[in-house]
Image (cartoon, coloured by chain):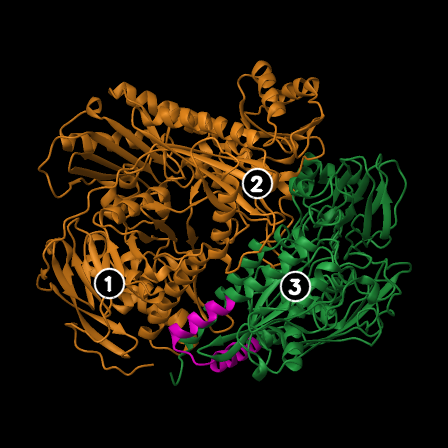
Amino acid sequence: MVHPRAGLTDRTDLSMAKSAAKPSTKAASSPKAKSGITRLATDIGGTFTDIVLEQGDRRFTTKVLTTPHAPEEAVVDGTRIVLKEAGIGFADLDVFVHGTTLATNAVIERKGARTALIATDGFRDVIEIADEGRYDQYDIFIDKPRQLVPRQLRFTVPERIDVMGKVWVELDEAAVVRLAKELKKQKVDAVAVAFIHSYANGKHEERVREILAREVPEIAVTLSCEVCPEMREYERTSTAVANAYVQPLMAGYLGRLKARFAAEGYGKPIHLMTSGGSLATLETAARFPIRLVESGPAGGAILAAHIAAERGEDKVLSFDMGGTTAKICLIHDATPYKARTFEVDRQSRFMKGSGLPVRIPVIEMVEIGAGGGSIARVDTLKRITVGPDSAASVPGPACYGRGGELPTVTDADVAIGKIEPARFAGGAIKLYPEKSDAALDASVGKPLSLSTAMAAHGVAEIVDENMANAARVHSVERGVVVSDHTMVAFGGAAPLHAARLAEKLGIARIVVPADAGVGSAVGFLRAPAAYELVHSRFMRLDRFDLKEANRLLSGMSAEASALARAAAGNRKLTETRTAFMRYAGQGHEIAVALPIRALTDKDMAKMRDSFEAGYRQLFARHIPGAAIEILSWSLLVTTDTARPPMLAKPKSKTGPKPIGTRPVFDAKAGKTLKVPMYDRLAMAPGARIAGPAIVVEAGTSTFVTATFDAEIDGGLGLVLTARKAGKSAAKAEPASKKGK
Amino acid sequence: MSKLSDIELQVMWNRLIAVVEEQAQVLLRTAFSPIVREAGDLSAGVFDREGNMLAQAVTGTPGHVNSMAESVRHFVKAFPVDTMKPGDIYITNDPWMGTGHLNDFVLTTPAFHRGKLVGLFSCTSHLMDIGGIGFGPDGTDVFMEGLYIPLLKLADRGKLNETLMAMIRANTRLPIDTEGDVYSLAACNDVGCERLSEMMEEFGLKDLDVLSRHIMSRSKAAVLEAVAALPQGKWSNTMTVDGYDEPVTLSCTVEVTRKGIHVDFTGTGPASKRGINVPLAYTTAYTVFGLACIVGKDIPNNAGSLAPLTVSAPENSIVNALKPKPVASRHIIGQMLPDVVFGALRQAIPDRVPAEGTSCLWNLNVRGQTEDAGLGNYGFTMAVTSNGGTGARPMKDGLSATAYPSGVKGTPVEIAESITPLIFWRKEFREDSGGAGRTRGGLGQVIEVGSRIGKPFDLLAAYDRIDHPPRGRDGGRDGAAGAVALKSGKKLKGKGFQLIPPDDRLVVMTPGGAGIGDPAKRDRAALERDLAEGLVSSKGAKAYGG
């Protein structure tokens, strides 16, 4: 539980509340270089706004409480604090990167604009008919997602375009004019226009925008063919609706933020962190604000990618565990995996299909209800279950003594002994371990006739297994073997569970970075400026329309380059082109890289080869001779993220003396062991200790299991390395090896 | 590994569920059949050496899952596990050994760990065409309904049975898709086998015996505990549906005892001359699914949890049709069975049971010529999946245009138009179709579709609840009856082959769910909202009085 990432991800985490009410500031370790550009990153979360200022090698960070009525207030106040600390002013800033959870919260709390939908005649209910499915097969009492646009504001007009982009029914412009009057009468603030097959031909949607601009210029308009030019009417319409819903609010907020910063003397552009892990200009963000959802977690993934790059790690699993959820993301060659769809506001406990789909470029993560605050119970099968619901900030884990009576993962960690109560959250929160014990006994121990310690062990074991399963399914879906990855663990609860999770996944190396408390905002400063477009255009490989493909790609290239250039300044831009291909008749595609030039006849055979190789990797066998088709094309224009220089490897030396020992329950041994406890700040680069051990710091504790050793590396990361079997250097009293 | 702790067993159980979920995802991602890839008409599961189902993927549809559970037992009987070798794959589409009609292929693959057969993976998906008269109810025996594959070896120690593959290719209108789907089914079992072996390596398991016993006994005990919380007794119910050419009576008696729940279908009408008959395995699948929704929704599905829920039906009744009765559209009747059972259960536990709904899928099973030939298939064949409204629930309205009890989702219009030369002109809610009540039934939808290429196309209609709409209860009104017609006005039959002329359109109006309770007692704010949203018209509001 503990704090650190009070960003978007840990909205419910209260543990830093006391210390954060008074902003705290701290300078990073090496104050030597004062030169270099000065960069500011801010991340607005539900509870806290995180501020990071980097000036050369110096880093200043603070957390202030978010000001929901006018979020820019907290941003400006927090910025003042770090600027003062650094001894500079707004005018001295070279770069400002901003991320926010406002768009997500507006959807979750249904506080967006009064929004209307204009659809093709006959298709008024696309968003509510959705996929006609039930996200929970056996639950006859499910609720469908609440709609952002009530049915009375869902309108249709005569027009129809077919799958090839051919017009069957011309747009009835008079009907649009009449509708404009109705929208005005209905006091609508924003409109989404989503016609059938508009990804193939956006002419009618564009014409509607022209007419609305003339008739009702005060209404903001989102076109589905711009925000999501992809096939499948439900996902495209849902994306357009969500964008329209948050657009007036976000445009207003971003405008005010810009004005406030300008008034303070900041004259340079403001960049926004997107869910895809790249930066967009404030103007682009104001047009497509839906691309800002999940910017906080994206920042965390970017940080993990950077941590990996500094250490020459090519395959990384980032593990971010906060108060409510755990997020797991795959990062290869310092680049997080990307996805093209995401669900906002899942109705039911993180279940797939229970949210509103938005089809945008996102850093692909699996998020499950497994955090420090997740509640443990025993179900009808006498199985221990953990989460997905969380004790949140009110009442919080039982050990907080704030009225929580249900045991949480944090309570289990306390009962096992992994958390030193006196040092929890840097001593900011008083813990009551006896309340953990009582809650565990009542909810888990008694029904299963287990001791308190075994009950706590069971809870920790199940939450770790849940996360391991999520990681496994996620990686295997992508044809990735997870055991050869390095884990980067951050977020308040992650370091407590990272080693056990790694054991379960067969992972031999873990990095717990320094200063993970403001990880997302730090990540913002590592993100490239980029723009990515995805466009559906159906084409078979054996009857490829070269001219059309090249026309489409060059158009996308021009559009993405212009938007990326705006955010990139004069930095060099690189383009990536991808075709999403499948066997003709299948429903899911595989990404195949394309050359960055006009395609020629010779490229067809190469595309087939790349596709079949990718297919075999994912699904064991390919299908000889089957026809292949391309459904969508994506084009990314991005600044190069220069790989950071590799960190020098410090000379290993014996670590500092333990600051004490903690009794920790060891389930394998069936008894409590004395485990040494170390102060992380006292560990210099190269300092090495053997597990089992607990390494404490203000934000969290890292639990080093008996199968790992730990060392501080050249970048102040705490690196856990699995010990080869048999070479136990454990300083704890040896556990009697009873085996299973 | 001598003794596994409960916690270790639980971890392994969770892992097993994750393995089959992964198996299902592979099937979903590699399938060719649009009803699988867009609508999820599939299932996947893992079995012990005796053919007991240990775990099944949540992704999938109940009719497949619970019947596939039986089918693996048939495989194991025909091919003793001791004779199975790595690389073997077994196949069938026998309606009485598999999942109830020829369109479903079931593939079973033995899973080996360290050279020893430790279990079996099985999966099934709905293939769009298997020859014969096609996926419609017009056949008068099963032999008219397509290629019949008995329990056979599809691969022998890794070598594909090319003779069988050639027979399959030659007997379908969609050879390309059908062959692709066979590969897809094989691949998903492969992935399951690999993952199981990795898991056993990690946990140091030599076999699944202990884990299997744990899963069965825990699940069975949990279901029994849930059953024990129900009032004991016997309740009966009868429901009449349209049938092919005459109404069909579906009767059941539900008996709740300490040993479980038994459903007997004595009193149900005889088998039909046409393909709406149901093999017992499929009857059992949907009946047990309905029960599980009420008594065990959080209990994972496996042989243990299914064991206390049993079903019987008189031979050659429509719900226990024997070979060679035609069965292609067995889902129409099969998917009605949860409603029949709920009608009995509601006498015992009214607050936990919904009113009658559309229940059977309202697919547009269409077939015809394509604009150009030469893609390797013969014209197009497509099931544009779609649904009506579900019945009102105690305390909640029914769900509009939602699959229940099937898990088969709707097909996106843009996808349907990319696969077929059709153009959809309308797909939206059907006003006033939800049965009025204190809680209202879910709405059906109106779908209107024509040819994009000026050619006629075939409708293989398989609809019900046109003459017998879902019935309201406790004063709630019936849901709207379904309807099928040409745009020009001519009414079409609810079942059987019909031609849609090139210059006309097919109009399908799916039924609405029934209501519960006196409509006059409906919350006025809810009624106002329905009126504002146009789900209920001012005329429709009269049913609510006041």
Task: Say which residue label 2 marks.
Answer: A235
Q: Which residues are magenta?
A: B192-221
View extreme (bottom): residue:
B2
Q: Which chain is orange?
A: A
Disc 3 packing (10 Å; few <14; some 14–19; many ≥20)? many
Q: Secondary structure at mark 3?
A: helix
Task: Say which residue label 1 marks.
Answer: A703
Q: Secondary structure at mark 1?
A: strand
Residue B91: x %, y % from top left:
65, 70
A702 in relation to A383, above or below:
above
Distance from label 3 to label 1 (Cα)?
44 Å
From the viewer's perspective, tell me whether residue B254 is left or right of residue B154.
right
* Nearest to the observer: residue A357 or residue A727: A727
Distance from label 2 to label 3 (Cα)?
26 Å
Disc 1 packing (10 Å; few <14; some 14–19; many ≥20)? many
Check the picture and name the quadrant holding the C terminus of chain B: top right
From the viewer's perspective, tell me whether residue B358 is left or right of residue A291.
right
Task: Say which residue label 3 marks.
Answer: B62
Distance from label 2 to label 1 (Cα)?
42 Å
Residue B280: x %, y % from top left:
75, 72
Q: Which chain is green?
A: B
Is A405 within the magenta? Answer: no
Q: Amino acid at mark 1?
A: Phe
Check the picture and name the quadrant holding the N terminus of chain B: bottom left
* Nearest to the observer: residue A11 or residue B42: B42
Report in which chain the residue with disc 2 lies: A
